[in-house]
Amino acid sequence: MSVVPIIDVAALKGDDEDAKNEVGKALDRAGREIGFFQIVDHGVPEDVITEMYRVSDEFFALPDDEKQRVRQPTPDAVRGYSSVGQQAFSYSEDIAQPRDLHEKFDVGPVDVDRTDPYFSPDLSGPHFLPNSWPERPEDMEEIWTRYFREMNDLSRRLMGAFARGLDLDPEFFAATIDRDISMLRAINYPHLDQPPLPGQMRAGAHTDYGSLTIVRQEDAPGGLEVFTQDGDWVPVPVVPGAFVVNIGDLMAQWTNDLWISTRHRVRPPTPDDSGDTRRMSLVFFHQPNYDAVIECLPSCVAAGEQPRYAPITSGDHLTQKFEKTISLAG
Ligand SMILES: O=C(O)CCC(=O)C(=O)O
Ligand SMILES: [Fe+2]
């Protein structure tokens, strides 16, 4: 039995209030115990996921100079392509180690009204920067946009269930996530021809920065691991059809660490793993509106005690994490 529970979330698309509350309770338990769970019956059509894998595979297979044409412009503008060895996720935790063995492509919000000043760089800083799409595959933007919208809808259903699990109004989070600054990433871990450096990871240990993260992983060697409350690294098994969901820093801050923003990493294949070890994940980082103030829920702090975290906006939290990555990467 894995320590990461599997939760059927089909009820979140229906009208049965009791069934939705039950899902909320299961998510609350998982949030407290491990901060990770796998969801099944999530309502995202399988063909949307298959198509995402197809176009993303095609993109990563392009020659490097073509991928570099859409490279990430600056460390705090997380848009476009980053090549292998450009970053280490562990920098966000002030841990220096050899750079990660992954390449990735990132996009930000896909439905942005550019005539509204709220979304202008003056007010929103790096959070609504336009996306930069490659010329090939030619349907990349269409497919990624469809997947982004599916992930956003699913995140909103989950946030509604989180509110239920925390005994809040189901709409409690709605006003903080209606202009979210979420990001979608495909992260590709190439097959390794030579052993990694000592301590080198495919993705170094980190917590995720937002409210929740939705991951689709592939069944290939060298996979996702979570750091349990007992201090062990344990694998997150691949469950056919499921998404892995984890709690991010901002849910932990909202709940005063009642829910855990769990550290995780992607380990490299071992010398015993034979054959092609390439692996790709699709990762959606759900992140509240940049001006949403994340402040400890009154029900999560005991009378007479102080919350563990000072209030912070979602946008500032994200920018601070990006800045850490920059300062350590030097
Ligand atoms: O590839 C994975 O399974 C997880 C990647 C990850 O943790 C991240 O991009 O934040
Ligand atoms: Fe992560």
Image (cartoon, rainbow, N blue to C red):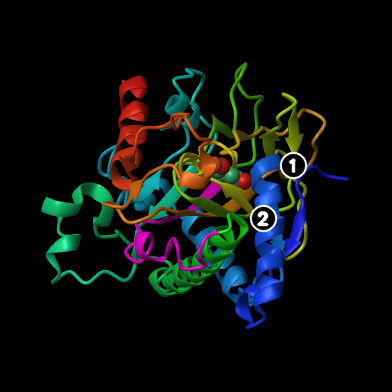
- Give the quadrant of ligand 2: top right
Q: Is residue 59 above or below residue 17?
A: above
Badge 1 crowding class, 10 Å Cα cut-off, few under 14, some 14 to 19, many 20 or more, is some
Q: Mark 1 or mark 2: name the one nearer the start of the chain.
A: 2
Q: Eyeballing the image, is 57 above or below 314?
A: below
Q: Element type at marker 2?
A: helix
Residue 41, image quadrant: bottom right
Quadrant that contains the C terminus: top left
Q: Quadrant of residue 163?
A: bottom right
Please say whether residue 189 is visible from this viewpoint: no
Determine which of the numbered discs, if any, sits on residue 206 in the image: none
Secondary structure beneath disc 1? loop
Instruction: Name the residue nearer the viewer: 221 or 60.
Output: 221
Instruction: Report whether 200 appears left or right of 290.
Output: right
Which residue does the numbered mark 1 point to in the structure image?
221
Residue at x-position 46% and y-position 46%: 297
- Give the residue pinned by disc 2: 27
Q: Residue at x 51, y 21 (%)?
A: 98
* Residue at image location 66% in from the left, 32% down from the top: 267
Q: Which residues are magenta?
A: 168-189
User: Given the image, on which type of amino acid does mark 1 rest?
Assistant: Pro
Residue situated in front as seen by the camera: 251 or 135: 251
Residue 240 location (% of width, % of height): 77, 62
Mark 1 vs ligand 1: CB below 8 Å: no
Q: Does residue 70 show up magenta in the picture?
A: no
In the rendering, at what x and y percent does residue 257 appear?
55, 36
